Image: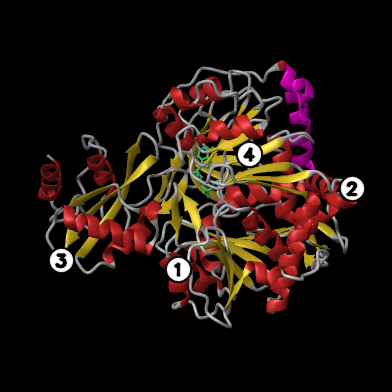
């Protein structure tokens, strides 16, 4: 187990960023929200009368039954648009057809193999979603049942999500980089009745064995009765008669006008598993009306969406960013989205900039880890590329270091594009804090100010607000439409994780500080969650995976700073058998890859005779973090049970 949380309010901030960038005048003059006064007016309105504010914005949703009440808040439980019924796929598709936007491009897709490209208009996307929805209905999938989606970033991934929404099934997208163990766990926890997958997917020229991984997972997830398989790479797969059906056979002859299921506002739209501070990933549950309204509204505000924009969010739909800003937010807003299937360095390190030159997106939203990779790969991959289509840049997933921010601003944005550093979480459903590009002066490294409807506070361990300038726990004091509604099948964990430490307020799990201008600076997690390349991993998940290997007695995982990934995974293991050395390191890496997936594979493996522990037996991660980072231990070691352990660990490294 971990050492006790570092008390909030005692965090010293080491960031002193003085630079400030006002929004370009010509950007502001055309922006949806073009001045701080306008932002302030919206912010105050949402704060004073949230029901009126959100009621006004919900009016444009395609209700089939009007709601009776905007908000019912019984902390920690919230209901938005109580009693209303609608369908989220209709909010993303049908209402745009009804508004005469059927011929507008909904989606431009670029495959990883050079030259592959497809586009779909809103009418075409609607038709595809309807066919798949009808096919899923014919398989017998009912509203409220869970469908896992394990697919490469193809248009069909977006179509599969919307098709589930159309029939009221709850989707659970599993990132294509996860292993069969991870699929089985998620299928089992959610009691999924079907899996939608593909034969394979392209990743840096190699074919991911997606269907094969599903086959292995299904040996352990008996709730799954149907598997739908998209033919993507053409690699050979086994099809199990009675269980497996090809996507193209499923949709064959299906109608292009399947009526949407009218769902309750609060009916679950999806669950998405994310790492917490225990070994078991939790299924974060989002609902229909509130979620889609939040995704759309925040997309419109933060990305200043206009009718002629082409919005490129580089996230995979396996993460929340791909849910809210590839699929639901932009499509509900009627925008055109750009999707790229593959890796940024396939087949060369300039692939993203080639895509920008060819497809001419206007908005580009990516993760700091990607930006650091581009910096490392060097400017030659950008030379001669025309990036002039871009007007706005965004980041998400972790804090962006000011150097990377400046590089992004100058090299990609040509000094002319505002940058929105967006802070949010799987749990929040959509962006919570971010500059508004037409009005908020930005400071590199700060996510600046809360969006209208978001009322944050920074508190100490007693729940008391800390003085301005001091660090503490970030909490939300008011409900917002996109907030999580629960942890799938685990009410206790929902209450315990988010609502018990500071009663009545949502605990985000991040430390933060507010500067003299009221700007927010995120200072990292308060729990044992690592942020590796913008992806959340729990240390305990990695430890459990290691300990499940017969040679490992005990394991501790910590993060250490990494130039590109933000954090790298370092593990300390004590052995019960086997010989420490490169061969066993390889075996353990392979084991973690099998248990969780490639992104959890440790970068460093330290074999140790013992791990440093407190007298009560807790592993002292703080010390391990120092060792992993090659730092001197400055912290308190007086609770260390056996001083020689630390000396030995350091000795091992030299
Ligand atoms: C971190 C991703 C600093 C934070 C949408 C949060 C950030 C966790 C930022 C959520 C940012 C995300 N600045 N930190 N702009 N954005 N984080 O659930 O620690 O994958 O709690 O959602 O990422 O990660 P998640």
Residue position for label 4: 312
Q: Which mark is residue 576?
A: 3
Instruction: Report helix, strand or loop for mark 2.
Output: loop
Foreground: disc 3 or disc 1: 1
Q: Which quadrant, please, contains the N terminus?
A: bottom left
What is the CA distance from the residue labelled 2 to the residue labelled 1?
43 Å
Q: Position of residue 225 (x, y in %)?
A: 58, 80
Could you tell whether 590 is left or right of 186 in the image?
left
Q: 573 above or below 7? A: below
Q: Earlier in the sequence, mark 1 or mark 4?
A: 1
Instruction: Report helix, strand or loop for mark 4.
Output: strand
Q: 434 above or below 202? A: above
Foreground: disc 2 or disc 3: 2
Q: Magenta part mainly helix, strand or loop?
A: helix
What is the CA distance from the residue labelled 3 to the residue labelled 1?
33 Å
Q: Which mark is residue 99?
A: 2
**What colouring style does the render use?**
secondary structure
Q: Magenta segment range?
A: 26-49
What is the CA distance from the residue labelled 2 to the residue labelled 3?
67 Å
Residue position for label 1: 212
Is residue 134 found inside the magenta-colored segment of the image? no
Q: 388 above or below 195? A: above
Q: Earlier in the sequence, mark 2 or mark 4?
A: 2
Q: Earlier in the sequence, mark 4 or mark 3?
A: 4
């Amino acid at each position: 187990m971990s050492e006790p949380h570092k008390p909030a309010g005692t965090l010293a901030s080491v960031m002193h960023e003085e630079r400030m960038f006002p929004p370009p005048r010509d950007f502001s003059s055309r922006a949806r929200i073009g001045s701080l006064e306008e932002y302030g007016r919206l912010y105050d309105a949402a704060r004073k009368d949230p029901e009126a504010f959100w009621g006004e914005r919900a009016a444009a949703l395609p209700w089939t039954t009007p709601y009776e009440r905007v908000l019912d808040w019984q902390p920690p439980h919230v209901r938005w648009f109580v009693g209303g019924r609608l369908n989220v796929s209709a909010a993303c598709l049908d209402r745009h057809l009804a508004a005469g936007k059927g011929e507008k491009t909904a989606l431009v897709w670029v495959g990883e193999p050079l030259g592959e490209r497809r586009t779909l208009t809103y009418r075409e996307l609607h038709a595809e979603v309807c066919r798949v929805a009808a096919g899923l209905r014919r398989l017998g999938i009912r509203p409220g049942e869970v469908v896992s989606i394990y697919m490469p970033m193809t248009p069909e991934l977006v179509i599969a999500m919307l098709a589930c929404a159309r029939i009221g099934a709850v989707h659970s997208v599993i990132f294509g980089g996860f292993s069969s163990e991870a699929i089985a766990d998620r299928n089992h926890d959610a009691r999924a009745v079907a899996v939608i997958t593909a034969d394979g997917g392209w990743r840096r020229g190699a074919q991911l064995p997606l269907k094969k991984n599903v086959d292995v997972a299904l040996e352990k997830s008996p709730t799954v009765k149907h598997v739908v398989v998209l033919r993507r790479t053409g690699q050979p797969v086994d099809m199990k008669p009675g269980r497996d059906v090809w996507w193209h056979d499923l949709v064959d002859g299906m109608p292009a006008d399947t009526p949407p299921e009218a769902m309750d506002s609060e009916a679950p739209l999806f669950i998405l598993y994310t790492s917490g501070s225990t070994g078991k990933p939790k299924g974060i549950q989002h609902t229909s009306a509130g979620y889609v309204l939040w995704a759309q509204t925040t997309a419109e505000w933060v990305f200043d969406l206009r009718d002629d924009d082409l919005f490129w969010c580089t996230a995979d739909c396996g993460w929340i960013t791909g849910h809210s800003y590839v699929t639901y937010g932009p499509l509900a807003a009627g925008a055109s989205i750009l999707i790229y299937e593959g890796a940024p360095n396939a087949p060369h390190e300039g692939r993203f900039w080639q895509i920008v030159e060819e497809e001419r997106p206007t908005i580009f939203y990516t993760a700091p880890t990607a930006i650091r990779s581009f910096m490392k790969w060097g400017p030659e991959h950008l030379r001669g590329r025309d990036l002039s289509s871009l007007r706005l840049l965004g980041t998400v997933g972790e804090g962006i270091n000011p150097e990377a921010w400046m590089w992004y601003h100058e090299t990609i944005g040509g000094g002319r594009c505002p940058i929105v550093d967006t802070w949010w979480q799987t749990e929040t459903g959509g962006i919570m804090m971010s500059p508004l590009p037409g009005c908020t002066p930005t400071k590199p490294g700060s996510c600046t100010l809360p969006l209208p409807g978001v009322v944050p506070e920074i508190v100490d361990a007693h729940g008391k607000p800390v003085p301005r300038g001091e660090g503490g726990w970030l909490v939300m004091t008011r409900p917002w439409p996109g907030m999580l509604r629960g942890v799938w099948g685990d009410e206790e964990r929902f209450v315990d994780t988010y609502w018990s430490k500071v009663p009545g307020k949502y605990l985000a799990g991040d430390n933060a500080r507010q500067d003299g201008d009221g700007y927010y600076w995120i200072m990292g997690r308060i729990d044992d969650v690592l942020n590796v390349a913008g992806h959340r991993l729990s240390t305990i998940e990695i430890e459990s995976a290691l300990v499940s290997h017969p040679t490992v007695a005990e394991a501790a995982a910590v993060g250490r700073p990494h130039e590109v990934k933000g954090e790298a995974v370092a593990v300390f293991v004590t052995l019960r058998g086997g010989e420490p050395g490169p061969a066993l390191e390889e075996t353990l890496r392979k084991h973690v890859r099998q248990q969780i997936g490639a992104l959890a594979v440790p970068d460093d493996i330290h074999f140790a005779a013992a791990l440093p522990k407190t007298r009560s037996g807790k592993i002292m991660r703080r010390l391990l973090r120092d060792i992993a980072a090659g730092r001197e231990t400055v912290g308190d070691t007086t609770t260390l049970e056996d001083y020689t352990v630390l000396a030995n660990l350091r000795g091992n490294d030299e």
